[in-house]
Image: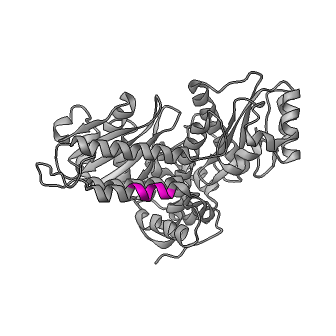
Amino acid sequence: MKEGHETTSSGATVQDAGALAETFVMLADTLVDDYDVVDFLHALANACVGLLRASAAGILLVDQRGGLAVVASSTEESRLLEVFQLQANEGPCLDCITGGAAVSSRDLGRDVKRWPRFVPAADAAGFRSVVAVPLRLRTEVIGGLNLFYAEAQPVLASEQRVAQALADVATIGILQQRATHRSAVLAEQLQQALNSRVAIEQAKGILAERNGVGMDAAFGTLRRHARDHNTKLTEVAIAVVRGDIDPPTP
Amino acid sequence: MVTMAGNRGVVCATDDRASRIEDMQLTAGVGPCIDAVHSGSPILVADLDDARDIDVSRWASFGETVRDAGVRAVFAFPLRIGAITVGAMDLYRDTVGDLSSGQMSAALLAADAAAIALLHLDTDGDGAFEPSADTRADYRLHVHQATGMVSVQLKVPVEEALLRLRARAFASGQSVSEVAADVVARRLRFDEEDS
């Protein structure tokens, strides 16, 4: 790993070793405790944004039915989530998962023929370049980590290495240590993570409507309640959907 | 296939043997189907004789009974849509081994379809089950956000809100995704339109 700062042609700094180390320590600490996988991946997506100077980061997982699903994102804003979700049909993240290797575009404007639906949507959301790296487990690709940048810029090899390391940590997080020796543990955990995400969306919808706030604020309310009560995010979401709790908006 | 909500019990089984095993799980209150419902995660046991599998050892008498019935592997899939849990689907096999990725995908799609069908059976909502409707698990996030919003608008459980969304889509010739997008964008309210 490169020490100190590395500067791109556009002047943006990449990670420094200290911040990088801190991030991995933070993620490793989370993995020790009983944790919520969607909450963990949300923290990881935010770490990507901070470390790699990306505008947004998202994680898509294969749904084992022939599709892809957004499971975490650095932003909960609906418009941006849609850009991530679009890649279930077309885009760098889909190509990365299909090919099992990193895919990047330093200038999306030049790749409009390659991704005719994705590029205009990304452009409308303010993104100009993109990197996607695979979430790998041995020979299998279980998803992709997607980084979006506001500027058209070359993707540095060092950045791509860090992104791949973070993607590998994401895979570990999804696998969750469980006291089984089953070979099918990945399928069990993948389906669990995907369904957690659906429960969180249901709860976001309830809070957004009840409190007259956006989806981003509703997610914040869920997350704060989970933190304050030392509960898993998914459990809070399920309790909201069942009407057991009504977390207050700040 | 069992349902835990509404009329709790075995909904259907392919033969007597499967039916007996399901009844036994419900009576004993232990087994892969019970675990799948409570954990919300598929429980995929490729080898019921694997002594390292702590779940199997917890099931105690269930394990013996199914092995006596010639079952060597069991795959239990929760039937759920987010926080909505309607039951579980169990697959039994007389040979040891994991499901192939193709079999896994087929089982998940079958569980998706069963979850939607059972939701219609279990809810007194007015949404009739349309076999032609898309029954694959929907991971477009705004569909589930809209479900939550509609449940608040109509003061009904999310189960019924989801059926109302699907019924509206069917009645208006739109996709569920299109109706959901209108709800999330606050262009459409169900409490003004439907009641």
| Closer to us: B115 or A180 | A180
Q: Position of residue A127 (x, y in %)?
A: 23, 50
Q: Which portion, as a residue range, is magenta?
A: A24-30
The answer to whether residue A10 shows anywhere in this view is yes
Up-down relation of residue B133 to residue B17 (above or below): below
Q: Position of residue B167 (x, y in %)?
A: 57, 48
Please name the predominant secondary structure of the magenta segment in the image: helix
Rendered residue at 25%/35% (across/down): A116
Rendered residue at 43%/39% (across/down): A143
The answer to whether residue A50 shows anywhere in this view is no
| Closer to us: B165 or B74 | B74
Quadrant in which the C terminus of chain B appears: bottom right
| Closer to us: B51 or B156 | B51
Choose top left, top right, bottom left or bottom right for residue A188: top right
Up-down relation of residue A176 to residue B68 (above or below): below
Residue A166 part of the magenta segment: no
Residue B188 shown left or right of residue A159 in the figure: right
Task: Looking at this view, name the residue that lies furthest to the bottom.
Answer: A250
Rendered residue at 29%/40% (across/down): A118
Choose top left, top right, bottom left or bottom right for residue A35: bottom right
Task: Looking at this view, name the residue that lies furthest to the top.
Answer: B95
Q: Position of residue B50 (x, y in %)?
A: 75, 32
Q: Position of residue A247 (x, y in %)?
A: 55, 73
Quadrant in which the N terminus of chain B appears: top right
Residue A51 shown left or right of residue B50 in the figure: left
| Closer to us: A208 or B161 | A208
Color scheme of the displayed model: one colour
